[in-house]
Image (cartoon, rainbow, N blue to C red):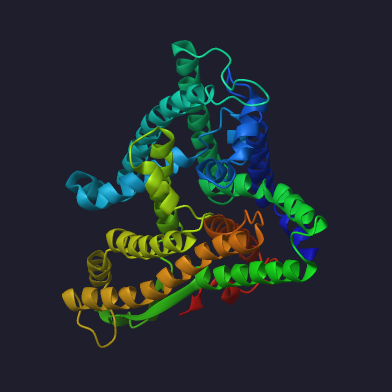
Amino acid sequence: MNVIANIFKIPELRRRILFTLGMLAVYRVGIFVTTPGVNRNAMREYVNSSSNGFLGMFNLFSGGALEQMSIFALNIMPYVSASIIISLLAVVVKPLEELRKEGEAGQRKLNQYTRYGTIGLSLAQGIGIALFLESLNQQGTQAGDIVNEPGWAFRAMTVLSLTTGTAFLMWLGEQITERGIGNGISLIIFAGIVANLPDALAATANLVNIGQIKPVDLMLILAIALGVTAIIVFFERAQRQVPITYAKRMVGQKMFGGAESHLPLRVNMAGVIPPIFTSSLLMIPMTLAQSGVPGMQWLNDKLNPQGPNMWIYMVVFATMTIFFTFFYTAITVQPVDMAENLRKQNAFVPGVRPGKATAEYIDYVLSRITVGGAIYITSVCTVPTLLQAKWQVPFYLGGTSLMIVVGVALDFAMQVDSHLITRHYEGLASGTTSRLSGRKG
């Protein structure tokens, strides 16, 4: 209680937290604004009947916006996709790479390209969703047709509504980052996932009541969930601290430098990008199968995580996740640039020559800790599938979603702590700076 009281003693921190909560409340209200021309009850019935597939995962990350067919149905995912694409291009495209090295001015330009990419992806996905909704009218639901009046007017309105909704969420996230506390985009995704927690708990309780999940199994599920959460906290804060020393230099009659520090390398440098890439690619066969593409139904059956070939899905998922972990780390973390920056700062790794040797050493260390990070990500993301296969439990806060929730919560707590400790108040981490630093790998 003292921590909560200390938070509201600081006017700036109190204002930032209240602003963040207010913007997240606006986002949650917008979830229930349905796109014009869509039968919300029929859409909810269809999504609930497909909760274990692509639509279920999409609905989870959108905070239930898909089953409402809300103007926020695309959520902030087009922005995330555009950010990933720009980050990848900034490594392989020379002009973008030069912008990335220009500091704040170059980053603003890259952010502008990301916004343009977000609008472009929203337009494309909006068209796809409009056509998909019209195709569902042929299947029908007990609540009636999903689209009241199919046609180009409906398609144009759907594309406009979804694109505008995504653009508004992008602006909302930037406002939270600038005027609130924490990363706005991450907090929007966090709020969408956490919003499904009450339904997940209610569904699990119902399975216990009907006897599908025994009390002993429920205790085991809770123990696994807590264990996975603890593992995520450990690895998300784990670092390998490479020691560095600043060279001594004479300025006038005084000696400067000689200080020792460290270069922190996170065990999980790729974050949640690898499982997101993998999940998206594995959902392509399902999407193509629904469109009637020849051969895709057979491939979709083989990669069905709920079917008899679950082990095939698990092996493919694990292999692709490990590959993307190394791939994304390799293109986003540049040991050559890090070695060059150390040289410009008159810093060096003890026992390692500056320049190329330092870059090779950093690459060697990074490769070793990435092995642990890849195993960690793969293990965490496969646990929910195993739980669903054994108990058929709606473990929504598992895998990728649990990594996002825990990671965002840790980041939010650390930022609040930094405000409190700066002003000599007791923080969420007991007011000690050592708690805020990453665990040594």
Q: Where is residue 291 drawn, in percent x and y? A: 40, 32
Vertical order, 54 against 291 (above or below): below
Name the foreground residue: 223 vs 15.
Answer: 223
Name the foreground residue: 74 vs 347.
Answer: 74
Q: Where is residue 7 drawn, in percent x and y? A: 72, 57
Name the foreground residue: 95 vs 59.
Answer: 59
Left or right of residue 362, residue 148 in this image: right
Residue under the image location 26 percent in, 49 percent down: 90
Q: Quarter of the image for the C terminus: give it.
A: bottom left
Left or right of residue 71, residue 12 in this image: right
Vertical order, 376 against 5 (above or below): below
Q: Where is residue 175 drawn, in percent x and y? A: 54, 39
Residue under the image location 53 percent in, 42 percent down: 58
Left or right of residue 255, residue 274 in this image: right
**Residue 263 in view (yes/no):** no
In terms of image quadrants, where is residue 210? bottom right
Vertical order, 88 against 143 (above or below): below
Residue under the image location 17 percent in, 48 percent down: 94
- Which residue of the protein is positioned furthest toward the bottom in this rendering? 351
Q: Where is residue 274 drawn, in percent x and y? A: 40, 58
